[in-house]
Amino acid sequence: METKSRTLEFTILSAEDLRIHNKSVKKNAFVVVQTDSFNSKTTKMNGKGGSSPSWNDKLVMDMPMHTRFVTLQVKCKSSGGRDKTVGLVRIPVTDFIGGYSPETCLQFLSYRLRDPKGLKNGILNVSIRLKEPLQACSSQAVASGLGIPINGRNDFGVVTGIPICSGYPSTSFFR
């Protein structure tokens, strides 16, 4: 059976240190989640969270199989009623699909936001969970690299990696 999209469950938890023009956001912050140009959902507006609002809003949405990034945009409603962009993050799909943990596991992630000028502007805390396992997708999706079996196994086992720095003299480690 071939599937053209996957169902994702986003929980927009909170944000930290949100600013507009170097001033703390006072209220009315919300988040827009966009999986592609046709699929977007919005959290409720946080009326009193200030520069560190919390939403704890769960958004269930479809993500097309070809999607490479999910965009999360924090905005706030100005006193004049206009939406102002506070910050934006583009999350690579590989951050939560095809990694070292099973795909249907709930994953807690934090991302640095960038304002419209590209400057750092706060942190957004989210959780993401794929609602259906990879086996429910077409064989073409598996071949596209969204999950790689380990040693020919099809269970996508957990692997622990240990980073090795090459910036140190070879005599300082592993003597």
Image (spheres, helix red, strand yellow):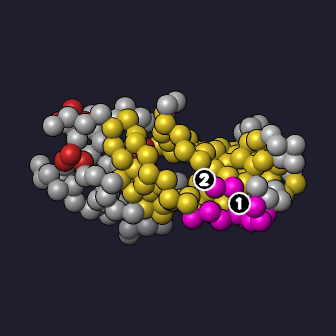
Residue wearing tag 1: 46
- What range is drawn magenta here? 44-56
| Residue shown at 38% from the left, 35% from the top | 64
Secondary structure, mark 2, is: loop
Residue 8 x/y as whole percent: 40, 50
Nearer to the camera, 108 or 161: 108
Identify the residue shown where x is 19% and y is 52%. Answer: 150
Query: Which sits in the foreground, 52 or 111?
Result: 52
Between 58 and 135, the residue placed more toward the observer is 58
Q: Is residue 83 visible?
A: yes
Within-10-Å neighbours for mark 1: few <14, some 14–19, many 20+? some
Residue 164 in view here: no
In reply to whether residue 140 is colored magenta, the answer given is no
Q: For mark 1, give the secondary structure.
A: loop
Q: Residue 137's x, y, as percent?
A: 22, 41
The image quarter containing residue 53 is bottom right
Q: Are marks 1 and 2 in contact (CB under 8 Å)?
A: yes
> Which numbered dot is residue 66?
none
**Crowd class of label 2 (few under 14; some 14 to 19; many from 20; radius 10 Å):** some
Residue at horizontal 20%, vertical 46%?
136
Residue hosting label 2: 43
